[in-house]
Image (cartoon, rainbow, N blue to C red):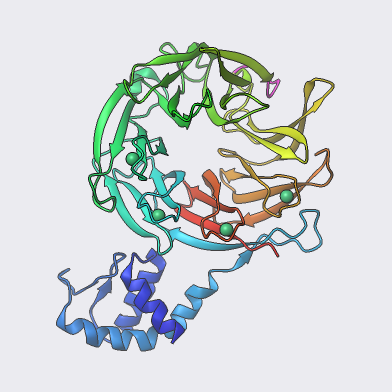
Amino acid sequence: MDSARRLTGAFAHRLTGAFAHRLTGAFALLGLDASVRRDGTVRDRKGDRMALRWRTAAAAGLALAMPLLALDTAELRSTGVQEGGAAGGVRFVTHNIDGELASGYQPVVADLNRDGRPDVIGLSTRIGELAWYENPGWERHVLATGLSRSINAAARDLDGDGIPEIALAHEFGTTHASSLGILSLLTHAGDPRQPWSIREVDRTPTVHRIRWADPDGSGRPVLVSAPLSGPAAEPPEYRDAVPVYWYRPDDWRRRTVTDAGQGVVHGLLVKPWRGGPGDAAFTASFTGVHVHRYLDGEWSRETVAAGDPAPWPASGASEVEVGRLGERDFVATIEPWHGPQVVVYREEAGSWERRVIDEIGSGHTIVTADFDGDGRDEIVTGDRGDTRRLNLYAAADADGASWSRQVLDEDMSPSGCAVADLNADGRIDLICIGGRTANLKWYENATP
Ligand SMILES: [Ca+2]
Ligand SMILES: [Ca+2]
Ligand SMILES: [Ca+2]
Ligand SMILES: [Ca+2]
């Protein structure tokens, strides 16, 4: 009965590719020349939707599919458990959202249909459609089509109707010669499941990281936009100044946070930091980690850490995140650009002491959250190079002097991760998107 309900439910929304493939195989074994599509429809050889024959096929296919469905259920396995490890038994149950998402790059969590459940936008750099997945069945809905080289999205409700507007950076390239760098704003047209309207608001070549922020604590969001490189930057050195911009969404006039960046600015983090009135904006670049704060109508810029001390262009940092160990802040980075080092900075006598806690192949995302509720944030990052691996690091002590590693998933080359409580059980969950693994998953926090 459960399996029958699961199958019925599966047909009500989008299937994973592997699941659709299995059902097609089951129909073939029954001699039915029908293929099951990922949208849940059954088609005959010519590709026409099967109507009258569908009930027969479904009944027969259901009977045969039972053991196959059991296999599919087995994929929802518990991962990353190291019993007795210093991580204290953080457990996740892995759920596939999309298994055929080529060049997955960034997951954006936001409630797009105003039902109180956070949904997930799965941004791909290669697919021309921008789509979101509706929690809890993860039905896929297209926001916009005809896009090229999308690179980042950021959702925030600007007009107070309960459905966010979505800023989108597209036409990305790593140099000015190769990138139009379009910044657009998507707005729903009544039904958020139908395509949204899209309008261009600015062009800044190499537009790359965008985040909504509330820098003055007023509750009025602004968009921070960090292009990757400056006008004269060329690989492999990328030598040039590179600005960070910001916009008020009432006029979309381009304003400058800083023009002091150099080389490649790859990481942008917006979070409150150390008692400022609102959000701070952190950048990670060839010259390290900087924090920008908006005070008295002006942005200040402060160096946090120089990052990897290797010579340019292997210097600095690529991604930046902050976290807490009890009352102590820490800064976590991937260093250098697309690099192998997972680094934690702890403050000692007023300066940030650098400690490389792991070497991986190629890191591209880093997030923190207290998954087990012990007052210490864990770190999640992973390898999106030849090795495909999602890792969690837990501090073994209150100072963060040593960290243990848990492998969460070996079928995830994370280009981007996010944290949010997707199932409203009070425990923060993890959402990651893979480029080489071409997938989008959420990891349900099942820590006892
Ligand atoms: Ca929702
Ligand atoms: Ca809105
Ligand atoms: Ca913890
Ligand atoms: Ca949860």
Residue located at (36% from left, 20% from top) = 205
Give the x, y percent position of residue 364: 56, 38
Q: Is the residue 72 above or below the residue 145 in the image?
A: below
Judge by depth and name the residue closer to the eye, 395 or 390: 395
**Direction from residue 41 to residue 89 in the image, left or right:** right
As for residue 78 lying within the magenta part, the answer is no
Residue located at (62% from left, 20% from top) = 290
Residue 311 visible to an observer of this rendering: no
Give the x, y percent position of residue 437: 48, 52
Judge by depth and name the residue closer to the eye, 448 or 61: 448
For the C terminus, give its image quadrant. Answer: bottom right
Judge by depth and name the residue closer to the eye, 187 or 36: 187
Q: Is the residue 354 above or below the residue 257 in the image?
A: below
Q: Quadrant of residue 57?
A: bottom left
As for residue 308 lying within the magenta part, the answer is yes
Judge by depth and name the residue closer to the eye, 289 or 326: 326
Give the x, y percent position of residue 402: 82, 41
Q: Is the residue 358 above or below the residue 83 in the image?
A: above
Residue 86 visible to an observer of this rendering: yes
For ligand 4, the image quadrant comes to bottom right
Q: How many marks?
A: 0
Q: Is the residue 280 above or below the residue 296 in the image?
A: below
For the N terminus, give its image quadrant. Answer: bottom left
Residue located at (67% from left, 49% from top) = 392
The magenta segment: 305-312
Per the picture, the main secondary structure of the magenta-coloured stretch is loop
Give the x, y percent position of residue 76: 54, 69
**Direction from residue 250 to residue 373 in the image, left or right:** right
**Direction from residue 190 to residue 75 in the image, left or right:** right
Q: Quadrant of residue 77?
A: bottom right
